[in-house]
Amino acid sequence: MKTVSLKGMRSPWVVIGCLLAGGVVAQDAPKYSNEFLAIGVGARALGMGSAYTAAVNDVTSGYWNPAGLLGVKGDLQVGVMHSEYFAGIAKYDYVGLAKPIDSLSTIGFSFIRFGIDNIPNTIDLIDPSGNIDYDRITTFSSADHAFIISYARKLRVPGLRVGGNAKVIYRRVGEFGKAWGFGLDAGAQYDMDQWHFSAVARDVTGTFNAWSYTLDQRTIDVFTQTGNEIPANSVEVTLPRLMLGAVRQFSFGKKFNLLAAVDLENTFDGKRNTLIKSSLISTDPRIGLELGYANIVYVRTGISNMQYVTNTAGDKQLSIQPNIGIGLKIKSLSLDYALTDIGDNSVALYSNIFSLKFDLFKRPSS
């Protein structure tokens, strides 16, 4: 994921220029478009290193694999998650709803927000007389939003489930710029004894974000005087990617269960810095484990974001993102926690992640 470093900036207004230029840069490098949707949702999944497309069977399926929605229990399942990045500067939130329609189909809705709030806008820091007036500083937010509607259906082929997503993207940088986008996902899961397989095509037709900017003359003048690029209306495209997954379930005695999962994220937009790469396809492998006791307590671990990075000596080293998590399930309530990128061993984001999931059941009529 490409990020903007705030350290060492001489003046806060530089942040505005960096954020606004993001839409233009993304058009030249579409492989980094809508990267807030690559973070993931749910502490269970993130504790397993995001190796989750074959294992998912709850409300978070709207993000990972819509076919998994058929595993939702109850009349309505609700999921929420919160995490923070960059020492609390950026906040990432998720809310999901899933409701079975009948024994063959389920619908879901997901909302995701990744944002930075209270960014200082110092465009008018200096008054017309040339004096610095801190009372003229205002603030704004830069936030990305995703609204996802999901549908899953069980097919006549035993063990086969399919699903799809329609998602609307809304990205906004204060009053300066905004973008609307639309995209489609498709997914499938297939069960074979203790094995479960999955395939997910994200942004299957390409997701298009149309950026438009509204800058007053004062802002344009300041950008020009300080050497910042003035953004222009543009369209950025999120290219398709294919997720393949498999998970195997093991039982030890009557109370212990183990899930072993692997996911392969495949992109087709040229060579990326992934563990497996070529000029045609790049593959990012992820591995996850979950040990459960009596379907109440769970311990999880996983590795992801495997790539080679160059150190200060110019040597390439393998960077791996380790993750751990725990979970507690009491009747219809599940509470999960994950710590991603333990010890900051990789170049990826790390965070403490909390998520909650609960099922609502209709009371039987008297």
Image: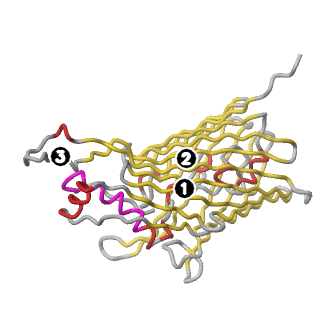
Q: Amino acid at mark 1?
A: Leu
Question: Start and end of the magenta stretch?
Answer: 8-25
- Does residue 335 lie above or below 174 as drawn? above
Q: Amino acid at mark 2?
A: Ile
**Mark 2, secondary structure of its residue:** strand
Residue ID for mark 1:
37
Q: x, y percentage for residue 119? A: 31, 45
**Mark 1, secondary structure of its residue:** helix
Q: Nearer the viewer, residue 148 or 91?
A: 148
**Tags 1 and 2 in contact by the CB under 8 Å rule?**
yes
Residue ID for mark 3:
125
Q: Nearer the viewer, residue 129 or 285?
A: 129
Q: Marks 1 and 3, how far apart in space?
A: 35 Å
* Residue at the spot 63% in from the left edge and 50% down from the top edge: 148
Residue ID for mark 2:
112
Q: Is residue 282 left or right of residue 313?
A: right
Q: Is residue 27 left or right of residue 59?
A: left
Q: Amino acid at mark 3?
A: Leu
Q: x, y percentage for residue 24? A: 40, 67
Q: Earlier in the sequence, mark 1 or mark 3?
A: 1
